[in-house]
Image: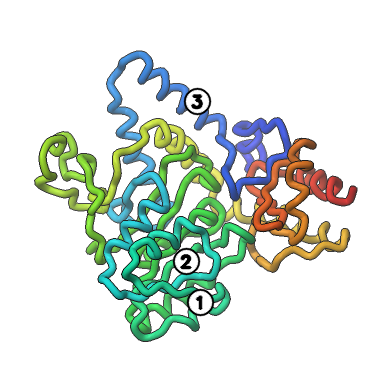
Amino acid sequence: METFESLVRAEFTPKNTFLNTASSGLLPARAVAALDAAVRLRAEGRPLDPLFADVETCRAAYARLAGVPAERVAAGATVALFSSLVAASLPPGAEVLTADDDFTSVLNPFHARGDLKVRSAPLEGLADAVRPGTALVAVSAAQSADGRIADLPALREAARSHGARTYVDFSQAAGWLPVEAGAYDYTVAITFKWLLGGHGAAFLTAPEDFGDLVPVQAGWTAGENPWDSCYGPVAELAHSARRFDTTPALFSWAGLRASLTLFEELGVDAVRAHDLALADRFRAGLASLGHEPLPAPGSPIVSVPGLGRLQPELSRAGIEVSNRAGNLRASFHLYNTAADVDRLLDALSG
């Protein structure tokens, strides 16, 4: 019987100490093989039907991960694209509540509209900031800059009590934090971070009745019968959330299909326990060195004020982390080990 460790060892062979999943995750061996097969299929001129099928396989796998029917999942390319779709659904003058300094792809489409009332509040007080007249609350489940986790249950209840919709970005959470997409009106997740896919694949979940979303970006793949929707206006939109799809970057979905099988084999709960144990080891080591990270309990993302300047030096030493607003951000995922944590701590102690 394969263990967590044996499964991971068979998939990953990093050549450095990679502690930067919050920027982009490593590709497992099975995803590399799937990408190679997809490229060869294209190079050899064979039909691309298997690659289009990969999109549907990924949709179903993500739906299981998110706890919703596949009919509620749309497949696209970026968070910003789906944020723009949600922003386009709001009437002029609608109030959108966001968290201070959240990731730009979550926020900017609402600001770009120019006719919405966008205001922000501290993450910890976001639920209390919902008020009568708030139309939408948009927030990342885990903050990119420092890993802080939003109190999503409190936010959901506050939004419901004021008749507001909710839009949650799980990009920094899906893969290690359970995604309860059915609890929110709209959720989104990019896949090249904790889900270990390539760039160019993202998911949106929508209500069964699609909420207020209008498929303003719909192309031929958004048709109920896509191959009958290639010319002229789409006569019949997909009866599912696929009506919000965009034309897929097929190679990305081929690799992601393989990556998602790994999460189903490992289990998100096991991944989360592994990731958080390493993050807690790092926090304890930082304390022994006299450093205090920004508070982010229960998160595998750890940001240390004032140490971001060390990122280039650490990279030259074979340790990959990020510099975010002057903070050193380390993020721990399933392919990391205690030895990785200790190597970073040793480097910081020097």
Q: CA distance from mark 1 to mark 2?
A: 9 Å
Mark 1, residues whose alpha carbon is within 10 Å: few (<14), some, or many (≥20)? many
Can you give x and y, in whole percent of width and height, for residue 184 in the image? Answer: 38, 67
Can you give x and y, in whole percent of width and height, for residue 284 in the image? Answer: 81, 60
Which residue is under mark 2? 139
Q: Is residue 80 left or right of residue 323?
A: left
Q: Quadrant of residue 325?
A: bottom right
Q: Is residue 50 visible?
A: yes
Residue 333 sits above or below residue 206 on the image = above
Proximity of marks 1 and 3: CB atoms separated by less than 8 Å: no
Residue positioned 61% across, 65% down in the render: 148
Which residue is under mark 3? 33
Which residue is under mark 1? 126
Residue positioned 37% across, 19% down in the render: 41
Residue 281 sits above or below residue 8 on the image = below
| Residue extending farthest right | 350
- Amino acid type, residue under disc 3 in the picture: Ala
Q: How many marks?
A: 3
Residue positioned 56% across, 54% down in the render: 176
